[in-house]
Amino acid sequence: MSTTTLLLQLIVILGTARVCGWALRHLGQPSVVGEMAAGMLLGPVVMGALLPEVHGQLFAKATLGGLSALSTVGLVLFMFVIGLELRAHQGVRQQLRAAGYVGVISTIVPLVLGVALAPVLHPALVPAGIGFWPFALFLGAALSITAFPVLARILKDRGLSTTAFGQLSLSAAAVVDVVAWIVLAFVVALAGAGEGYDALLKITVGAVLLAGLVYGLLRPFFAWLLRTHAPDGEPSTTVLASLMIGLLGCALLTEWLHLHAVFGAFLFGTCLPRDDRLLRSLAQRIEPLSIVVLMPLFFALAGLSTSANAFSNASLGAMLLILAAATFGKIGGGLAGARLAGYGWRDSLATGSLMNARGLMELIVIKVGLDAGLIGPELFTMLLVMALATTAMTGPLMNLIGGRVVAAHGTTASLATEPGPREA
């Protein structure tokens, strides 16, 4: 692949992502919805159908190696910050019981619905060599995702972060992230092991040993390093390089274990000290490169993996079933969990609506499934459409609930405020 081709691909992808993000933001949507949609536009479903020759030359399969490598680096950096943010949020401890209700129920209900859909979808959509249970469990895990970063950004931009249901939603989303990623890691390990339980045992033992290494050795080491050489939360270039080596090492180990690199990146992020200054410093250094430059490449590669067959008459019914199960499972599970925790109907409905936002986290999950061979391009496309639709409906649902709510410190905030410029 020539440098000229790579640079042209980067220009087209970044330009399309910026335009789509800007357009969707002016329609009241998070910009990430537009950036994800840009991937669809650049894929075979739109550009490939309208400009087949241009698409075939610009995104020929032999030229995608550079884009794939860059997008993987961006994904690893992004998941590192997500893991760090999960550790930085303390609402889980403050509302453990209520967050547990919402998080667990809003995970279990769509997961069960996904498994229940699997017998319908499995015969037509399963890739060769994948058994029923890995397929069914992955489908359930994919429907149970909540996008913690999307949710946090929506609440912040609407001034709802300090409301009762806002705090509850953030805490519950953290619980969902932990549960869903554990389930996903198990399913990917199951697929990577094939039919051999010995191989599954080796992957499981390797993952446990890696967790022991990260929390038993790396966590105290980096806590000492940051406490000694970055007491103000501003790591020097040497300390930052050490963090990047630890991050890439963990990503490499999970890749070597036949898990995805994102698991190692996320795990390493969770082991660092819970320090808002450190989070702010690392986010300022990493997010501009990761989110603005590298993640649109991930969206584009995801779009190139889509299939126009997902929009045929025979597949539209399956797509609608997936969307219905994902939406009602998440909203209903979140609402039921909040009601069990003692919240009123309005706050419970707002919580369920927020839990339905999937955003980029869903795209990462389904791309992991595609890379692992658990799903094919057609089901990947259906799940991508579901991710776009459920994220896009969060804002309108919050507006529909409407009214003004009282924040925890006594001020008021509107549910109908438009979302801000950027979220992930």
Image (cartoon, helix red, strand yellow):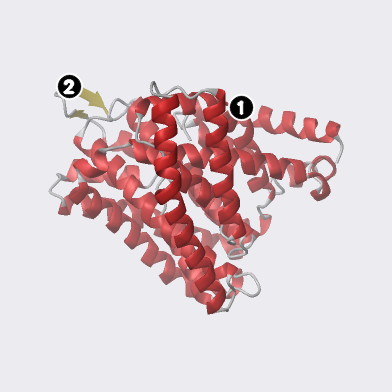
Secondary structure category for the residue under label 2: loop
N-terminal label among 1 and 2: 1
Please say if 122 is above or below 408. below
Point out residue 70 in the picture as x, y percentages from the top left corner: 68, 39
Q: Quadrant of residue 149?
A: top left
**Relative side of 410 to 81, left or right:** left
Above or below for 337 versus 37: below
Q: Is residue 68 above or below residue 27?
A: below
**Residue 94 % position (x, y):** 19, 41
SS category of the residue bearing label 1: helix
Quarter of the image where the N terminus is located: top right
The structure residue drawn at horizontal position 39% and vertical position 20%, both measured from the top left corner, is 232
Front in this rendered view, residue 4 or 227: 227
Q: CA distance from mark 1 to mark 2?
A: 35 Å
**Residue 217 visible in the picture:** yes
Q: Which residue was labeled with disc 1?
A: 18
The image position of residue 67, as x and y in percent, is: 72, 41
Q: Residues within 10 Å of mark 2 (few under 14, many from 20)?
A: few
Residue at 30% across, 37% down? 400
Give the mark count. Answer: 2
The residue type indicated by label 2 comes to Thr
Residue plotted at (67% across, 30% down): 14
Q: Residues within 10 Å of mark 1 (few under 14, many from 20)?
A: some
Across and down, in percent, residue 62 comes to 83, 49
Q: Residue 404 versus residue 127: which sits nearer the camera?
A: 127
Residue with the mark numbered 2? 411
* Drawn side of residue 45 relative to residue 361, left or right: right
Instruction: Using the rendered view, name the quadrant where residue 228 is placed.
Output: top left
Q: Amino acid at mark 1?
A: Arg
